[in-house]
Image: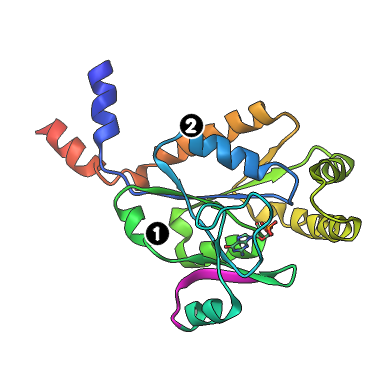
Amino acid sequence: MASEQALANTLKRRGLMFVLSSPSGAGKTTISRMLLEADADLKLSVSVTTRPPRPGEIDAVHYHFVDDAEFDRMVAEDDFYEWAHVFGHRYGTPKGHIRSGLKEGQDCLFDIDWQGTQQLIQKDKQDVVAVFILPPSIDELRRRLEARAQDSAEVIDARMDRARAEISHWDAYDYVVINDEVDTCFAKVREILHAERMKRRRQTGLIDFVRGMMG
Ligand code: 5GP
């Protein structure tokens, strides 16, 4: 049994792009962090942004922080999978090694909004697994945003407006999970990841494996 397990795990497999979206405050950042800690095969796609760092944010960990000129250069050189304007700043996903990583079986986690998700789906639908995290209620979402105490009332109002707009796109996702309890939500999201890895089309080593088995 143990050796069967080891064999299954060595089968060649194509990586996937695991997208988590939610309105800010619904918990996707927490869930992302838990997934990355629990799963060594998952690597975070770090976005590029022109937004200045918030206290505690680290360059190349939370974002690659760049100025407008650098962002313009990357756009001109077609360095982005996708990019978008959010709250007066620009955010983008650098193509980097994502595509070659997928070939090698590397899974990549994306913490991006609806617009960004649509663009990934348009370019690479087969590799994208899109999960939307909903808050248990609008009141709870506001409470969580206020509890962060990092933003002014105007910014919170703007985020609430944006949250409603973001939530309206729930039906563009493969999976929707309600985050009323973080551990339960995490467990559900992890099950999705595990099951998606077993999709036949991602298990590129299966043909050889079955051929070998049948002699
Ligand atoms: P924040 O400034 O709070 O970190 O992020 C603001 C918004 O930008 C969030 O909704 C976040 O999901 C989105 N965002 C972050 N990185 C990217 C990206 O690479 N592409 C797109 N389209 N949105 C992003």
Residue 158 pos. (x, y %): 85, 61
Identify residue type, mark 2: Ala
In this view, 31 is above or below 130: above
- Residue 19: say if magenta: no
The magenta segment:
77-84
Q: In this view, does 132 lie to the left or right of 139?
A: left
Instruction: Compute the Cα span from label 1 to label 2.
Output: 21 Å
Question: Which residue is identified by label 1?
Answer: 98
Q: In which quarter of the image is the N terminus?
A: top left
Residue 125 pos. (x, y %): 48, 59
Of the two numbered discs 1 and 2 on the same chain, state the one appearing first in sequence: 2
In this view, 116 is above or below 111: below
Q: In this view, does 111 lie to the left or right of 77?
A: right
Rendering quarter of residue 66 = bottom right
In this view, the residue in front, 60 or 179, is 60
- Kindly identify which numbered label has been placed on residue 168: none
